[in-house]
Amino acid sequence: MLPEAGAGRGGRRGGWGTDAGWSVLLALVVLGPLLLGRGYWLFGDMVFVPRQPWKDAWLGLDGSLPRAVPMDALVSVATLVVPGWLVQKALLLGALVLGGVGAGRFVAGAPAYARLAAITLFVWNPWTHAHLAMGQWAILAGYLLLPWVATAATRVRTDPRAGWPGLVVVLVASAVCSPSSGLVAVATALVLGAARRPRWQPAALLATGVVANLPWLLPTLVASTSRVGVDGVFAAFAARAESSLGVLASLWSLGGTWKTSVVPAERGSVVVVALAGLLTCVALLGLRSRPRPAGTRRLGLLAACALLVAALPTLPGGDGLLEALGERVPALAVLRDSHRYLAPAALLLLPGVAGAATWAGSRVREGREAMWAVVALLAVAPVLLLPSLAWGGLGTFERTTYPADWDRVAAVLEADLDTRATTRATTRTVVLPWAGSYRGFAWNDGRAVLDPAPRLLPGDVVVDDRLVVDGLVVPSEDPAVRDVAAALEGGDPGRTAAALRRLGVRFVLVEKGMPSGTVPTGDVVVDGPALRLVDLGAPGADPRDGAGGTARAVVLAGGGLTASLLLVSLALILRRGSEGRHIDDRRCESLGGDPA
């Protein structure tokens, strides 16, 4: 994003290795405990399993809202080839490194030391810490793609013919991460890539963004078994103040997550939040450096919009306004966690902190070598202000492994599916305790984690997916959950079993170590230290069939269109790369050199 003129002092040429090396170092410092051996990080929404069996839900074909479509499909395919613990390590390490390299490329014209400052600020900040600590790895991956989106969008504006294929690739990759990541990427592309000439370009950008997001957008539109409630959710998931300086000070320094339990201790300090805010101010002042970074006004507009969206539920009447609009347009519920939409604001800080570091470096003279200390401080300030991001939350995130009971239960359910394959029926399993979707397993040191059963076990697995936030119960979006809840209210084990069978339930899985309530009567087929599996007998009804034929065809056609656009774009990128190498070889031969 910075002009190429600064590339002479360790700039773009030869800078990939420096940027990648620094990005790898930062990633290793963050993920170190996870990378040292086998096992998983299991906390919050961070759920990886040894093998994730294929289900229609991974493509949004089960009629429910597609919250992890199509990322779950890719993870499922990956775990068929390599163990889940390797998939987790590769995805987290790859995302952090890719994000760091992307940040370096975004300020490619800056000196090496300035690029390192930008990379550190982008990878190591309160926003990154909050979403990693909440286990929202896919949303974090979408954030780490933003510099690539911004670079590609800027290139579309300046060189449309060469820029479109790259923009398609990063928009699709962002949409794969999560719906919110896809929306943020499209917004970023529109602000940074739209041009007055040709007139059709803004519409083409929007259309490209829509096609890139079809894999989750179409299942959302055709979902037939879900409902979205917005009562109180915008206030419950609104940004929060981390210190007495208030919520705006937290947002100004890329903090302010709603989940206060993951906020590190240092962010409760007025001094730390003030210094982090000062670093933001320094980055903004760095935008005034000469030569001035290109596209600053567009970046400023994008950052201002991101800050407004993040702060809106905290403003007087803001949550009420969103709730009223959400009643009429349920799709606005995607904005309930407003803090995640602060992500694009970080893009503005990258050329700013790079500009500030460049300015400080240019003031180094004989007798003024101390200015290098200012450069170094800019490069490491994010780490000094947020040490809790280091080494797995300073040891908070520990590796764990699944007990053998999970494999035993999965084998029983898989065998039942095989016996019913000729009838095209599936196995429905209800998971107890029926007390929300997060679990505190003893074998996971009691850390709250999203129940892994739906991803680890084959068939239709029903868990209580209600959320409880500060006393507010966010109801389930799935009518099957409400039906099962009604069946479990009876209290009598025999009647409960009969009611569940009428709903198509064959098995009840009891996760031990937590109050499970009434367990329906049935044959115990697995009873280990961690799990008990109860067979209720042949169900009296088939489980839900998922999306209808027309909806299924629409979803698959949309996914095929997105995949086709992605493949064509990749082919164009590879072709142009090959043509570029041939041109370089011919130039080398004309000068009497050796192309090899």
Image (cartoon, grey):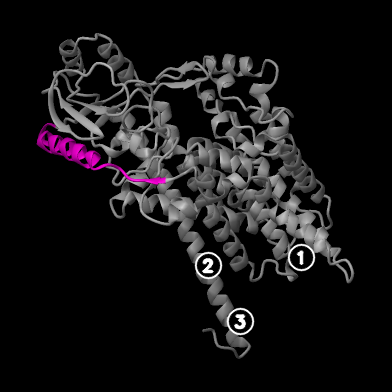
Task: Spot the residue most to the right.
Answer: 367
Query: Residue at the spot x=60%, y=53% of the render?
Result: 152
Please name the amino acid that badge 1 sits on. Gly
Of helix, strand and loop, which one carries label 2?
Answer: helix
**Image coords of residue 234 (percent x, y):** 57, 21
Please name the amino acid that badge 3 sits on. Arg
From mark 3 to mark 1, how far is it between C-alphas?
25 Å
In magenta, the rendered stretch is: 399-423
Query: Residue at the spot x=50%, y=70% of the render?
Result: 578
- Residue 587 bears which disc, if any? 3
Q: Which residue is mark 1?
A: 6
Q: Main secondary structure of the magenta part?
A: helix
Q: Quadrant of the N terminus?
A: bottom right
Whichever of labels 3 and 1 marks the residue nearer the N terminus, that label is 1
Q: Which residue is mark 2?
A: 577
In the displayed structure, would residue 578 be above or below residue 137? below
| Quarter assignment of residue 111 | bottom right
From mark 2 to mark 3, how far is it between C-alphas?
16 Å
